[in-house]
Image (cartoon, helix red, strand yellow):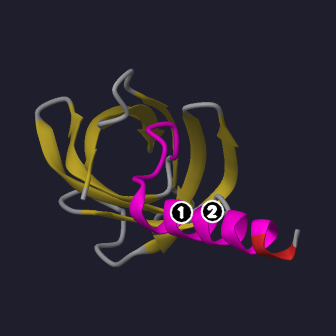
Amino acid sequence: MRKLWLIAAMVALWSSLILPASADDLSGSWFGPWYRGMTSGTMTLHIDSNGGGMIQMTNLDGFPEDEVVLSKVKKGDRRFKFSASGEGAGVFAASTQLSGDGEVLEGKGEYDGFPIEFRLKRR
């Protein structure tokens, strides 16, 4: 009985090490473009397995170039909602949806009253 338990534990360990993460798993680093009207830049979104994370955006007026901690995080089935504070009173609030194949994280958000769309791929 002890050998059977040991074998089962070893199989579980090896499976977790060699099998890829589920396509529904949102954790990891995501990178891609964001768009706001005629303005665009790049976004890097890090999502921790516990649902926390960081965001970094380039070329967005009033939003820091450095990484910003995510707040008001809600992680659901293939969905991820979050906010991130910009400079001053500005807050970037966004909602994402994981594509059917799990390769793309599409999202819409708002910053300073302007809509922002983004399309990120896992890094």
CB-based contact (under 8 Å), mark 2 and mark 1: yes
User: Relative to the observer, which residue lies in front, 113 or 40?
Assistant: 40
- Residue drawn at x 37%, y 33% as measured from the top left: 102
- Residue drawn at x 40%, y 63% as measured from the top left: 18
Q: Is 114 located above or below residue 75 in the figure?
A: above
Q: Residues within 10 Å of mark 2 (few under 14, many from 20)?
A: few
Q: Please identify the quadrant where the N terminus is shown.
A: bottom right
Q: CA distance from mark 2 to mark 1?
A: 6 Å
Q: Is 53 located above or below residue 20 in the figure?
A: below
Dot 2 corresponds to which residue? 12
Q: Is residue 9 magenta?
A: yes
Dot 1 corresponds to which residue? 16
Q: Amino acid at mark 1?
A: Ser
Extreme residue toward the top, this view: 100
- Residue drawn at x 55%, y 32% as measured from the top left: 78
SS for dot 1: helix
Residue 99 x/y as whole percent: 37, 25
Answer with left or right where residue 13 lies relative to residue 55: right
Residue 110 x/y as whole percent: 45, 37
